[in-house]
Amino acid sequence: MAPRPAAATVLVGLLVIALAGCASPQGATFTSVRAHAQEAVADVVAALPDGAEFTPTGDPTSTACDSGTAGPSGPEGTAFATFHGSAVLPDTADTGAVLTELPTTLGEEWAVEPVGIDTDVATVRVNRAGTGVSVDVTEQAGDGPKTLDILAVSPCGRIE
Amino acid sequence: MLRALAHPAVALTAAAVLFFAHIGSSGSTHRSPAHDAPGSDSPIPVHAGHIGPSAAAVWWSGLSAATRETLIRSAPERIGALDGLPTDVRVAANRVVARERLSELETVLTTLARRESAPASEAELEPLRQEHSYLARVVSGAVKLYLFAPDRGALVEMTGDPATATGILLVVPGTNASIRSFMVPDPVTAFADWQVDHADPSTPVVAFTVLAAPMPQLSIDLASGPQNNTIATAAGASYARIVEGIDVAFPGLPTLSYEHSAGSQVGSAAEEDGAHFDARFLAAGVGATDGYTTSPGTAYYAAQATDDINRLYAGFQMGDIGYGVGPEEFPGITIIDPGLSDVPVSAMGGMLARGLTLHNRLFSGDASANGTVLADVRLLLTSLARERTG
């Protein structure tokens, strides 16, 4: 069937063009995106009720960006930062109210991002303008102290 | 049905390609799962694939510890593939299989290194070295294989602690996935790894990245490409058996199936073969073939960028070519904005490059690239676990 090879050539050609043109612009340095993420977590913790205690889950991680975001030279020499930890709230705190009021408490530099999942879990996703850092704050389950899970992720940055 | 397409020029090209393709071809490269056929003197009274996972679990629980150990040593391939057995048993058996394969690989690599006439090329050596490195990590325990059946194109890697898990994440890669996709520097397990590493500590997760059978590969031969729906459909039958085995191994835990691209047809076909999920997440998915109906008790989510390359043919099917039910056409499905707005249109590839980049991002474990969907799936896993535990 003659048209079939021709059609295949068209499709493969389009894909080759697509792959060859796959490139993303270089962005900020890893040092700066990491600092932004760290500051974001500090801001969120500071906005929690007095007496809240934050404990990181291990050390902050730096992970190589994948080939889809790292730019034409590939993922080598790029990384994004992840900060993860838990904040124990005072017994008197109303966890739901804390999360509801968090964006307002954080101030105008912060915006609420929509969460795509319809869930009963108390949660809020916020980002700080101009940094690209997104922070998820979620009520943890369990019978222990009232605790919030905090996860912040930076954009991809160049390692200098 | 043929949906309105976002980019008419490209859509026409895609439609032409589909029209000229081998309509109605059943020439799938898929090989049916090779059912194990132990000899009459086998100490294993069941054949992988020929007995239900529940019966296999009952049989295994009735064996002595010494017999179990003997079986793992003497028949690791069968034990490592027997659905219904506990994950630690399968991982132990597949570690034995990996050790044997590693030994073979070392012989091959040594032979190639000593060959003076026609020295091996880097292209020849690289995949062998990658496999060697991967299997060495399996043997060391750094990588856990729930299934290792390269002869039938199947591999399932497990991440996380099954003893503490409150939920199960199943990740199904799509087009171009292969055994080697687990062994390369940017492996298909990245999405699952991120979820396990960053799970809410109050709801830990165990994840399985599932290559149930050979997946479609982009190639000159359009009959073996992702547009041929029979390949992913066949993989769905294998996926259903794997899911049933995991359900038996983890009674009562909720399951979320995250399916990328052609992987969503694997999930859809698995449902038609009896698999049940608490939730399915179609990430830049192809959707399902004509006649598909959603399963009661399953929540459905779909995410794909406005310019995802998949939209060029979503909802189009003629026989074995295409997928008649687009992912966003599933009744009651929740459509999620993946938040992918920072991918520029490059000069060379233009819209197609952007569409492909957006498509691939939804399988990325890079939270700086796919952060919204990673976070939403993380939240969904937390939510499912809490619903189950009350």
Image (cartoon, coloured by chain):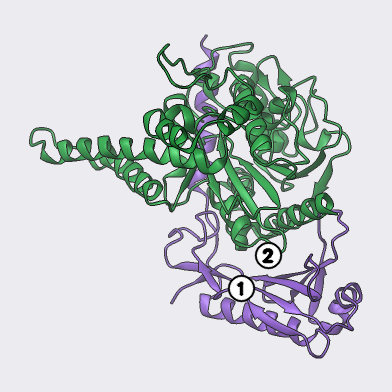
Which residue type does callout 1 highlight? Thr
Residue B334 left/right relative to B235: right
Residue B69: x %, y % from top left: 43, 37
Q: Colour of chain A?
A: purple
Q: Please, is residue B150 above or below residue B284 in the view?
A: above
Q: Which residue is mark 1?
A: A57
Residue B167 left/right relative to B44: right
Q: How many marks?
A: 2
Residue furthest toward the top?
A1
Q: Colour of chain B?
A: green
Res. B283 visible in picture: no
- Image quarter where the N terminus of chain B lies is top right
Q: Which residue is mark 2?
A: B201
Q: Considering depth in this image, is B289 or B218 the residue closer to the camera?
A: B289
User: Which residue occupies 50% across, 55% down?
Assistant: A67
Q: Considering depth in this image, is B388 or B351 the residue closer to the camera?
A: B388
Which residue type does callout 2 highlight? Pro
User: Which residue occupies 59% across, 49% down?
Assistant: B357
Element carrying mark 2: loop
Res. A125 visible in picture: yes
> Residue A40, located in which quarter of the rendered image?
bottom right
> Residue A11, located in which quarter of the rendered image?
top right
Chain under callout 1? A
Q: Considering depth in this image, is B187 or B150 the residue closer to the camera?
A: B150
Tag 1–tag 2 contact (CB < 8 Å)? yes
Chain under callout 2? B
User: Which residue occupies 83% across, 30% down?
Assistant: B294
